[in-house]
Image (cartoon, rainbow, N blue to C red):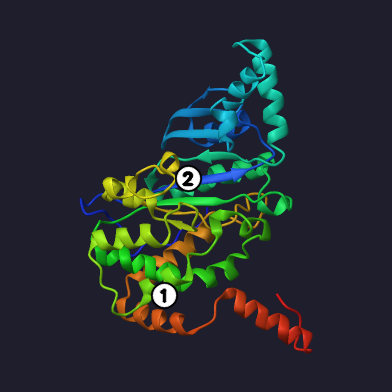
Amino acid sequence: MAQFADLPWTTTAEGAPRRVGVELEMAGLDAERIAEAVIEELGGEFQADSAFSGHVRGTTLGDFRVELDARVLTDRGYLDSLRRLGIDIEPGQTRDNLESLLSTVAGWVVPHELVCPPTPVDALPRIDAVRRRLHLAGAKGTQSSALYAFGLQFNIEVPGFEVDPLLAVLRAFFVEYDHILERESIDLARKLTPFVQPFPRDYVEYVLRPDYEPDLDTLIDDYLRFTPTRNRPLDALPLFAHIAPERVDAAPVEHELVKARPAWHYRLPNCRIDDPDWNLSEPWAEWVRVERLAASPERLSRRARRRLEEPGAVARWLGRVRDWLTGGGEPS
């Protein structure tokens, strides 16, 4: 069983164990087969909502959701498009057959997503056991195709809502971001998606300044001013919507897609579910590295100063290309 690194802050302000939700994107399996892997490991019962989605209810860890990651299908928005063409498909065998076909075709390029319930961090090995069953069942991940920009997401409950530790985590993530990209070998297809695009450089430099000492409202307002979108590798909008819903509601963000929760939405890692040598402890260790840096103020301050002075990942890669062109070895 995989060993998961410990967080530096293990409990919430109320003294409860911190929780984490996991989201896995994959191809190669339909919703029912994904649900079977959950049931084989954790029990429960699958309740299909359509050919595209459903829930596994009553497991030992709570309720899981399985869905094709295409809202026009899961919300049956395609029916409205057909009605505008004069085609009205009522519930029944015809719709079921059509949705089964659409699910198969869409599954070639649109991932199914397994959304796990928030669980205590020490239950992550159980989630990883589900991941292993999906791997053995033939799930395909990021590396299986140039079209598969599939991700793994962690929703990590924060230990509290004080501004200093929240700011420290943001700073630590900015310091570690380029290094995580390199260690995780983030797939090119995923780099081209909006979700792993880096934060604006001016915002990173603004937050890393030694004299940046905001209160909580200012921290949230600055985030909404510099980067009012959920499409970041560390999406703080769900957390800020939980803390200050009125501020997020007033900002020009994707309101219909922002789900308030007391957690960081970390969406950077690849989903390498088809790799027999990979498990969830590897991307989890990268997040723990961020939090451990955040929990070490002096080390974080030194790293932040260096980060303000050093080139980014793209500049370093271009430097390696330059060295290669001049006979210094191959670029990586």
Give residue 1's position: percent from left, percent from top: 52, 53
How packed mark 2 is, by other alpha carbons closer than 10 Å (few <14, some 14-19, many 20 or more), is some
Residue 79 visible? The answer is: yes
Alpha-carbon span between mark 1 and mark 2:
39 Å
Disc number at residue 126? 2
Q: Which mark is residue 205?
A: 1
Quarter in which the C terminus is drawn: bottom right
At 24% from the left edge and 61% from the top edge, which residue is drawn? 216
The reply to whether discs 1 and 2 touch (Cβ–Cβ < 8 Å) is no
Q: Residue at x 21, y 54 (%)?
A: 13
Residue 38 in the image: state x and y as whole percent: 53, 35
Query: Does dot 1 land on a helix, a strand or a loop?
Result: helix
Nearest to N terminus: mark 1 or mark 2? 2
Left or right? Give the position of 58 relative to 218. Answer: right
Q: Residue furthest left?
A: 14
State the residue at coordinates (62%, 20%): 84
What amino acid is labelled 1 in the image? Answer: Glu
Q: Is residue 26 left or right of residue 175?
A: right
- Give amino acid for label 2: Arg
Q: In this view of the protein, can residue 9 be seen by the observer?
A: no
Horizontal side of residue 17 vs 259, given as left or right? left
Q: 10 Å neighbourhood of mark 1: few (<14), some, or many (≥20)? A: some
Residue at 60% over, 41% down: 133
- Residue 217, relative to residue 110: is it above or below? below
Q: Please, is residue 76 above or below residue 312 in the view?
A: above
**Residue 157, image x, y percentages:** 34, 51
Q: Secondary structure at mark 2?
A: helix
